[in-house]
Image: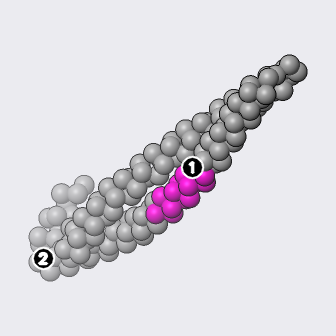
Amino acid sequence: MRRRTHKIAKVATLAASEERRFGEIAGRSRQHLDAQVDRLGELNAFRHDYAKKNSTSTAMSSAHLKDYHDFLHRLDTAVKAQQQVVRDGEQNLETHRKRWIAKRQRLESLRRVLDRYREEDNLHNARMEQKRLDDLPISQATAFGADDD
């Protein structure tokens, strides 16, 4: 392996490790977002059930009605806060996803360069071997050819 091929191979190995790390970060970001979306769904469902259950009660004291509205207001505040958490999580995921894609594209480029360098190395080695064989005296070249049978 020629020197430049060896260097690019090292860089590609490091880039693969970095790409993998960024992929894991994006995956954790996706899991966090999914959990926050689930929590938002639970909050919405609870708010809907609470509002539906207590709206059917006709005989409510003014104190109970005030508590009911206060609690609905707190639920609405919690839902809005959770919606913001979800929006932030979506932005975070998009940022991590873009970084991972950039690392992945860099790795693919390095692998293409490495493949090209390896092909050039193989061609160079084949030419050197052919030159070495061409420089041998005819009697030795014939002996090598006889061994191949």
Residue 21: image location, x then y, percent: 36, 53
Residue at the location (66% across, 37% down)?
75
- Asked whether 60 or 6 is in front, the reply is 60
The quarter of the picture where the N terminus appears is bottom left
Residue at the location (60% across, 52% down)?
84
The quadrant holding residue 110 is bottom left
Residue 107: image location, x then y, percent: 40, 64
Note whether residue 42 is visible.
yes
Which is the main secondary structure of the residues drawn in magenta?
Answer: helix
The image's mark for residue 98 is none
Which element is circle 1 on? helix
| Magenta region | 84-99
Residue 121: image location, x then y, percent: 27, 72
Q: Residues within 10 Å of mark 1 (few under 14, many from 20)?
A: some
- Asked whether 40 or 15 is in front, the reply is 40
Which residue is identified by label 1? 85
131 in relation to 53, above or below: below
31 in relation to 13, above or below: above
Note whether residue 97 is visible.
no
Amino acid type of the residue tagged 1 in the rendering: Val
Amino acid type of the residue tagged 2 in the rendering: Leu
Which residue is identified by label 2? 136
Residue at the location (45% across, 45% down)?
28
